Amino acid sequence: MLTVDRRTFVKASAMAAATAAAAGTARAFSLAILAEQPEGASLKWQKAPCRFCGTGCHVMVGTENGKVVAIQGDQKAEVNKGLLCVKGYHVGLAMYGKDRLTTPMLRKDGEMVAISWDEAIETIAKRIKANPKGFSFYGSGQWTIPEGYAANKFVKAGLGTNLIDANPRLCMASAVTGFMSTFGVDEPPGVYDDIDQCDVAIMWGNNMAEMHPVLFSRLVDRRARGEKVMIIDMTTRRTRTSDFADEVLFFKPHGDLAIANGIAHLMVKSGKYDKEFVANHCNFRKLGPKPDEKTPPDMLGVQMTFEEFAAAVDVYTPERVEELSGVPAAKIRMLGDLYCNRGIKINSFWCMGFNQHTRGTAINCIVHGIHLMSGHFGKPGDAATSLTGQPSACGTAREVGTLCHMLPGGLAVANPEHRKHAEEHWNLAEGRINPKIGYHAVELFKRFNTPTDQGGDVTTVWVQVTNPGQTLPNLGRNFLKKKDLSDKFLIVSDVYPTATTELADLILPSAMWVEKNGMYGNSERRTHQWFKMVSPPGEARDDAWQVIAVSHKMMELGDNGMKDKDGKWLFQTVDKAGKEVPIWNWENYYDVNVDERLFNEYRLFSRHKHHDLAPYGEYVKTRGMRWPVIEQTDGSWKETRWRFSGFDDPYVAKGKDFQFYHSVTKDDKALIWFRPHEFPPEMPDKDYPFWLCTGRVLEHWHTGTMTRRIPQLHRAMPKAYVEMNKDDASRLGIRNNEVVTVKSRRGAIDLPVWIGGRGDPKIGEVFVPFFDETKLINMVTLDEYDPYSKQPDYKKCAVTVVRKS
Amino acid sequence: MAISGLVVKLAEDDDAGAALARLAADSRITLGERFGNRLAVVAETSNVQADRDLFDELSAMPGIVHVDVTFVHLGENTDAGMESNKGDVEDQHAHR
C-alpha cells in the first residue's frame, strides 16, 4: 500500500470528497484514497445522520483512538449528495464541550450531589411507583426512534396512562393536524425530489437558506446550472432566503391566512382551478361548532359544497387581502396566476412560521387546499412541503407517537380499535391502554407548576433530550414556579447543564449521537440507522437504557404493570439462542442490539396506517428509506416517494391516478378546507406597541446547548439581541448596542439592540433569537395555542421596548 | 491544523472570474476540478477558527453564490475545542 504522511492523506481525502460532491457523483477514487491511510493510522469511517436539523443529511464519521476526528458529507446519501452545511461542519465538535455531564446527581438539602446509577434508578422507580398518575414523561424530536418507543411503551403499556408528550408539540404539531385534517393521515405526500423538479419554490414564512441550507443548496445549484427556478419569499422579515428570491413579499404578522384565502378566491373567480382533480379527488369542508368549554375542538368539521366554499372565500379579494396582509393586490394576483398555471410545477415550503401560530392548523390546511384545488399535487415537483427542525421530529414523535394522544404507527389513543391493536402488539390484557388522552406540553407544565392541592396533579416529570426550561412559552408561569413547589420532582436526562437542569432534582448524564446506536426519521419519511462509534464520557449512558432500567426496577419492586398479560417483562430481550439478556444492567446492554429488538417490535405497528417499515437490517445497508417500504417478490425492499399517487404508491388501487386511502370522509378523497382569516389573540396596542417575533439564527441550533459549546460558533454569535427598525430606534432615542428592556404582559428581559440587524424588521416589529440561555426571551412570549394542535405561537405577541436609562 | 473540503458555487457573471483568480492566489486554498459552476477546493489553515473564518470569507466573496462543506478534519481540535471554550462555558454557568 502507498504510504503517505498524515497531512497529505487528510488533504487528499478532503479533495476527493469535494471533487466527488462537485461532480455530483460518488467517485470510486474517493474511497480508494481514503483507504490509503498513513502508516500507523487507524481512522475508521462509519455512516450516521447529522445530529442537528430535520433535513436528514448523512455524514461519514471518522473516528480514531475513541474520538470523532473527521466529518465528511456522505456521497452515497440521496439527501445531501456529499454536501454539508456549516452546522454539519461542526457536528463532530458538539460532543466535546468541557462541561459534559458525567455522573448522576441528586438534589439533597438544596445541593446537587453525585450519586450512583443504582441510587438514581431506584429513586425514580420508587417515585413513579408511588404515584404513576402524577408522573409525566416529556421527550423530544431528538429522541432516537428506539428511545422514543421505549419511553412510549413504558408510559402507555407499563403505567397505563397517556401522560407523555414531546417538544414537537412546540414545533410541528400544527403540521400534523394539517395533514390529518386534509389527508386523514400524517406526514408529507411528497419528498425532496420535488425540490429538484419544481419550477417555482414558494417559501411561506420559511427561511430555508439558513435553517435547511443543504435543501436550499439544491435549488441554488439548479439555478447555477442554468435552470430557471423562481423563488418567492413570503416573510415578515428579511432573511438570507430573501437574498436569493425573485420576489420578496413582506406580510403583516398573521397575514398569511389572508394571503392563502386570497389565492383560493382567485382560483374560484378565474375558474382556473383543476376541476377534474377537485371533482374526482376532493371534498370541501368547514369548521363545525366553535370550540368552547363544553364543545371540544373537532378536526372533522362539516361538509360544504363548492358553491358554499366559493361564497366563503368571496370576501378575500386581492384588495381586501392587501388590507389584511400588507402585500400589494398586484402581488396577490401574481400568486393566484402562478398557482392557477398548471403548465408549471410549484413546491410550497413552510416550517415554524406556519406551525408556531394560533391558527397553525388552519394555515396548514388552506395551503394543502390550494395545492389540491390547483392540481399542483402528487406529481414530481408539485408538492406542499412541511419541513421540520429536529432530526427525528417525524421519525420519533409523529411516527412512534410519543404524544399524549397518539400510539405508535399513527394510531390514536381515542380510537378503540387502535387501542386494541396496541394491546395485541404489546401482549397486554384487553382494556390496558387508557382511553383518556394525556396532557399536551403546555398543559403538562402548567400542572407541574401549579400547587398539587390547587389542581396541579402532575408531580413528577422526566425530561429527556430537550430543554423546556428555555423553550416553553411564558416561562415564568410554565416552568419557574416549580422552584417554590417542594413536592414537585424534576428528572432531567441530558448531556450538558441547561436551563432545565438548573431546576432539576435529579440529573442523569446521557450518551449523545454516535456514542450510542440510533435511528432517526427525517422530514421526507426517511428512516435512518447508525451504530455506536465512540464511548460516552464518564458514566453517561443511553436514554433508552435509563427507561428500561427504571422499568425493570419497578417490576422488581412489585409493579405488575411492567409485565405483559403472560407475566413477561415488557422489555424482555433474548439472544439468538433464546436466552434472556439482562439489558437492565448497563454492563449487558450492548450484549445484544437493543435498538434492533425495539425497532422490530415497533415496526409491527407501522402496517395499520400504511407507514410500513422494513426490518432493522435493511436500514443498516442503506442511507435511509422512505416509508411505506414494501417487500418485493424477490425479497428486496422498495421505498415509496410520492404517496397517494398511482404511479408510485403501491397502496393506490391499480388503475387509479390518485387515492387518498385514509380519507377523513372514507371516500378516498382529500379535504379542501375553508378556514377564515382571524386576528391573533394578542396584538400591539398603546401599552405594548411592538410585534415580537422569535426564532433561530444560522450559527446556533435551537437552544444552543450544543452549538454554544463550539467555540467557533459561539464566537460568531455570542449573545442574543433585539433587532429593531431604525426609525423605531430613532423615535425612541435608542442607540445601537444600547441595552433595553423588552417587556410583555408576562415578563421582561434586557437585551442589546441591533438596529436593522440581519432581518431589517419593519416599523413596529422586533425580533429576538431564542438560542441564548442567559437571555430567555420565552419569559416574554405568549402561551396561547392553536385549539387543534395545542401548539403555541412564538412568532407573535405584543411587547414594549423601554430604555433603561 | 485544520483541513476542509469545500464545493464553491461560482456565479454566472464577471465576478466569477475575479473570484477564481483570488482563490488561485490564496495560499490557504488548493483548487481542484471544476464541474460547470461547481469548484472543488481544499482549505488548509492553522486551526478550526481560522478555517471557519475562511469559510465565511468565501461565502461573502463577490462571484461566489454559495459554499458547501464536504469534509472537515477536526483532529486534535476536539481537544483544543474543549479548552478554548472554557471561558464561554463558565460565562453560561455564571449566569445561573
Image (cartoon, coloured by chain):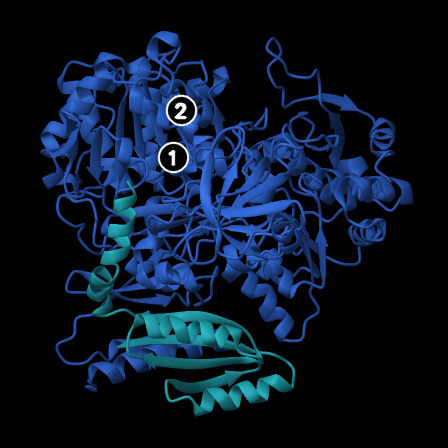
Chain colours: A blue, B cyan
Which three-letter amino acid code belongs to the residue tagged 2? Phe
Instruction: Give the percent coordinates (x, y) of residue A659.
Output: 67, 38
Q: Are dots 1 and 2 in contact, CB under 8 Å?
A: yes
Q: Which mark is residue A445?
A: 2
Quarter of the image holding residue A393? top left
Instruction: From the top left corner, tell me how far across and down residue A463 is, in percent.
Output: 31, 32
- Does any portion of residue A17 appear in the rendered image? no
Residue topped by disc 1: A468
Determine crowd level at label 1: few under 14, some 14-19, many 20+ residues with C-alpha closer than 10 A: many
How far apart in space, not on screen, are marks 1 and 2 (Cα)? 9 Å
The structure residue drawn at horizontal position 32% and vertical position 15%, both measured from the top left corner, is A134
- Of residue A744 and residue A792, the one placed in the foreground of this image is A744
Answer with the quarter of the image where residue A177 lies: top right
SS for tag 2?
A: helix
For this view, does A163 lie left or right of residue A293? Answer: left
Task: Please tell me whether residue A460 is drawn above or below residue A584 in the rendered image.
Answer: above
